[in-house]
Image (cartoon, rainbow, N blue to C red):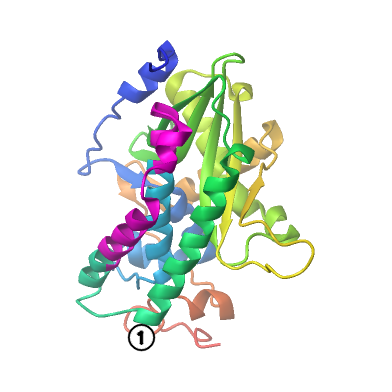
Amino acid sequence: MAKKLPPIVKIIRNHKPEPINFGYQKNISYSQLSMFRSCPKKWALQYKEGHKKQTPSIHMVFGTAFHEVMQHYLDVMYEKSGAEADRENIIELLEEKLRAEYLTQYKKNNNQHFSSSEEIKEFFEDGVQILNYFKKNKGKYFNKKGWFLVGCEIPISIMPNNAYKNVIYNGFLDVVLYHEPTDTFQIIDIKTSTKGWNSYAKKDEEKHFQLILYKKYFAEQFGLEEKSIDIEFLIVRRKVYEDGEYPQKRIQTFSPASGKNKTTKATNILNEFIHEAFNYKGYKETLHTPRPSKWNCHFCAFKEDDKLCNVPGKNL
């Protein structure tokens, strides 16, 4: 027998964000904020001028497919049972999702392949190892007692700055759980990684800000207190050292600090982006400065197009 859903869970599940009026409103996301902070010129080319140059990768394909499989497993686990979830053929589902997502990106890439069959097979086999590990150890990461799955891919759509009523911040929360006994929530962001996060990565505030902003705007959207919401990264590792006396875990968890100071810092950074890029009419007529660097330019989709970006130093 299914557990009776708490009223707040019903409210969130039934919530439908207001549709965006693209003739007036500008849709922004954390991806845009991150790109702008990395290189304003790249942001302007892709979002302001509409040059959609994003080369797909097997990492992107795997991340999307793995998210969908994990979310399906959790949906069955919380809506039915862990035993029922274990009976799901998630290995076959991962293969299906990988094929479908690769085909989608292949078509977007002008029917050009961007990965080899050997590489795709390697990523699939890594995913199988992660899923097998997760099924054996799911109790370490997810508890059902008193918990409800609010949903996966919960949409956030909110006006982050009242001075810019035409700018709407959008995002999707990977997994949201509700603990009825304590009336608290947990927002979980699933990250696929090659080797996981080391101590340096865990200290990188740029990685934290997205989840901190999600917490803030999830609270605002549903009239919740921020202190009732915990955030956590669930980091899945494709490559681990399995030899030795202490084999590495396939899954890491990490909960960044998300108190008042961190939230204020993240909000200020978002407001700086909005102020520099937008006005009440839409985009500002500003020439955004490129920030050439070995890291930025190496992975930039515009580096080969001198008509769009001819900044000296881009081939560092």
Q: Please indicate whether residue 241 sits to the left or right of residue 47 in the image.
A: right
Asked whether 116 falls inside the magenta stretch, the response is no
Q: How many marks?
A: 1
When the figure is inspected, residue 192 is found, relative to residue 157, above or below; the finding is below
Give how far across and how far down residue 228 sits, in percent. Answer: 60, 22
Q: Position of residue 62 (x, y in %)?
A: 41, 63
Disc 1 marks which amino acid?
Asp
User: Element at badge 1?
Assistant: loop
Boundaries of the magenta span: 73-102
Is residue 48 in view from this perspective? no
| Residue 223 visible to the viewer | yes
Quadrant placement of the N terminus: top left
Query: What residue lies at 25% left-to-right and 72% top-to-bottom?
Result: 106
Which residue lies under the disc numbered 1? 306
Above or below residue 177? Residue 153 is: below
Q: Picture coordinates of residue 29 (x, y %)?
A: 41, 48
- Is residue 256 toward the left or the right of residue 181 in the image? right
Q: Classify residue 94 by image quadrant.
A: bottom left
Q: Quadrant of residue 172?
A: top left
What residue do we see at 77% from left, 69% from top?
A: 244
Q: Position of residue 202 (x, y in %)?
A: 69, 54
The residue that appears at 33% across and 54% down in the rendered structure is: 93
> Front-most of 46 and 229?
229
Q: Quick one: which residue is furthest to the right in this view?
A: 245
Quarter holding the C terminus is bottom right
Magenta stretch mostly in which secondary structure?
helix
Q: Residue at x 57, y 19 (%)?
A: 225
Foreground of the two, 32 or 228? 228
Residue 105 sits in quarter: bottom left
